[in-house]
Image (tube, grey):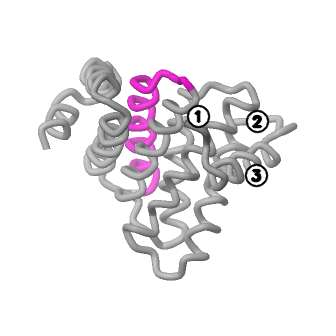
Amino acid sequence: MALSSVVNGIKDAIVATVKGASDVMTAMQNAVKDQVVTGLKNVGEISTSSLDMVEDVAQGALAAAKEIGGSVVDAAKETVMAIMVGTIDAGGDAIVAAEKAANGVVKGAAELGGDIGAVAVNAVQGAIEAAGKTGKSADEAAKSAIKGAVEAADSIGSEAGTSVRNALKSAASLPKDLVESALKG
């Protein structure tokens, strides 16, 4: 599956911003956040359906990371964090954004041939970290990100769904009870 023209446009914008930066991850986070804020401010009233655009931003960010030689797995965490912060800055719901961002990074990793299990784990870690920095519920953000990652994996195929579930369950960095609860729900 090829990246959509929207995702390619986002990727190109992020690459143009990040190339030559001394701190690539910070530059990438800022570029992703800017993409979200601009995109959401252009839609007017922010609703759950308008937050679908963050999936494209997430996929574009991963493609940008790969193009500049960065780690898709590491970029997943930073992307989810930047999307949640950007969504708050634009007046949107960060918890819904966590789900959409995790969905986007897992789909993006699958398209790029990345490790979707590791990407899903990092996406959830990013959601938890962003929630802590923004005063949102870390548990709600984690559950939302888990839901988004699993839905994306299931849409790819049963093997992908199993891989993501197993990675989330075995991740030492994630609260086991929270993962189990989210996977049952």
How many numbered marks does the figure carry? 3
Q: Nearer the viewer, residue 62 or 77?
A: 62
Q: Name the residue at 48% across, 65% down.
A: 88
Q: Name the residue at 49% across, 30% down.
A: 110
The residue beneath circle 3 is: 13
Q: What secondary structure prevails in the magenta region?
A: helix
**How far is the residue under mark 3 from the one under mark 1?**
16 Å
Q: Name the residue at 45% across, 60% down.
A: 52
Name which of mark 2 and mark 1 comes first in the sequence.
2
* Farthest-out residue, right: 20
The residue beneath circle 2 is: 23
Q: Using the rendered view, name the quadrant where residue 25 is placed.
A: top right
Tell which tag, 2 or 3, sits nearer the viewer.
3
Say which amino acid is labelled 1: Ala
Say which amino acid is labelled 3: Ala
Residue 21 part of the magenta segment: no
Residue 1 point in image, percent of width and height: 55, 36
Name which of mark 2 and mark 3 comes first in the sequence.
3
Residue 130 part of the magenta segment: yes
Q: Quadrant of the C terminus?
A: top left
Q: Is residue 52 above or below residue 98?
A: below
Q: Is residue 129 above or below residue 113?
A: below
Residue 79 point in image, percent of width and height: 55, 43
Say which amino acid is labelled 2: Asp
Residue 104 point in image, percent of width and height: 47, 45
Kindly state the secondary structure of the residue where label 1 is placed: helix
Crowding at dot 1, Cα within 10 Å, few <14 / some 14-19 / many 20+, comes out as: many
The residue beneath circle 1 is: 75
Asked whether, in this view, residue 84 is left or right of residue 139, the answer is: right
Asked whether, in this view, residue 71 is left or right of residue 9, the answer is: left
Q: Name the residue at 62% across, 25% down.
A: 71
Stretch of the chain drawn in magenta: 113-134
